Image (tube, rainbow, N blue to C red):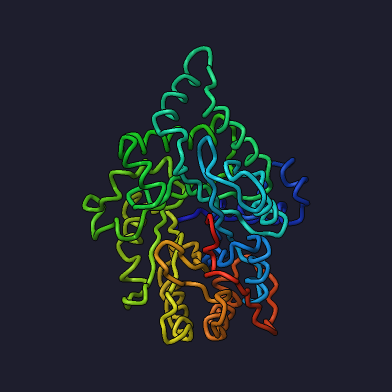
Amino acid sequence: MARTKIGVAAAVVSFLCALLATPAQAANLGLIRWSPVPLHGAYVGGFVNDDHGVSETTQIRAFEADTGRTLDIDNTYRCFGIPACGVHDGVNTGEIIDNPTVTSDLNNGRIPLISWGCSTKPGWTLLDIIKGYNMFRAPGGVETPVIQYLLKEGSKVKGFPDTVFIRWQWEMLGKGASGKCVQTDGGPANYTQAWKDVYTLFKTDVGATNASFVWCPSASDFSSTVSGSAAHAYYPGNPYVDYVCADGYNRADQSKNFGTIFGNAYQYAVQVAAPAEKPFMVGETGDEATNTGSQAQGPWITAFFSAVQQRPDVKAVLYWDSFNCSTQNDYSITQSAGKTASAPVAALHRIVSSPYFNTRGSSVSTPTTFVAMTDSFKPGCEAGS
């Protein structure tokens, strides 16, 4: 992406000041320690939750021990709406910030990516947000409950010294919770307006400029042209999107690489905001372990990240190290009981050790043991999950 020399110099100065400051000092100075877009290379992160019987924070530390480095980004899922959709890590997941996972990320140098989707239980609708924001901005400034909730969470985000990625209502055309809510709640018109309202409330009304909004459909919702992409109807517009993102996987019955999974989505990010482009994030991806074992995941991971290096607008890649309970797809490389995962772990270790994917200069250790989690149930699929 085009950057002026002055802009790069300013970013470097801000980065150094924030890096040397404590979290509290950085927040007071209005600095962030980590830019949402790395100055070179790409961030590496993931979703690590293969065993719901163990806290996410414990699993992330085990994953980092396996791969030898702190994740740049940690993806955590939270619910939007009242009543909240449940409790995880011992807290009500309706709260974005008041939970151990996000706090641990901020304290340990990870950038939180909050996948903030709607609840499958009754909660606030997109129309509630639109109507509430109109009332809030009207003379008198009435704060409806949904606006009070947004103001509270936005203020919390503003108070942190790091970038916080907000992946709001991701996969909006899909079959998951977000897709179900969007499709039954006014479709693209309400979705794009509600997105703009949430974005403006965070960035302008609250002043949470460290919030970076990630617009993330499924990779299959993009085609070879901007106008031909089903996702385009849900695009809120360049002023309201900080990252274009997509989710896509290589399942056991497929043989897909970066180009076949994300090629159209990547070109969309390049074209939609031309000539400036938008940074592109792989929000979720993984290679499914087949019945012959997980060793084939190593070459796939190596080839995938090699392809990323050929596409300079890819600025973040998050691996989905988990077992999908509903579809029974297993993409984990480190935690499924009974798997020998040395090849994919070694591949990811080499990747996160390379300068291109260690853009923050994190210390790298040599993994000495493979830390495996064991379950008395199918990984991640205990009763009630």
User: Which is nearer the eye, 186 or 307?
Assistant: 186
User: Which is nearer the eye, 125 or 379?
Assistant: 379
From the viewer's perspective, is 384 left or right of 300? right
Q: Is residue 43 visible?
A: no
Q: Residue at x 51, y 50 (%)?
A: 115
From the viewer's perspective, is 347 left or right of 15? left
Q: Is residue 64 visible?
A: yes
Q: Residue 330: horizontal and vertical position, in percent?
A: 46, 72
Q: Residue 205: horizontal and vertical position, in percent?
A: 55, 29
Q: Residue 284: horizontal and vertical position, in percent?
A: 45, 62
Quadrant where the N terminus sits is: bottom left
Q: Residue at x 41, y 83 (%)?
A: 291
Q: Which image quarter: residue 239? A: top left
* Vertical position of residue 340 compared to residue 237: above or below: below
Q: Which image quarter: residue 59? A: bottom right
Q: Residue 200: horizontal and vertical position, in percent?
A: 49, 33
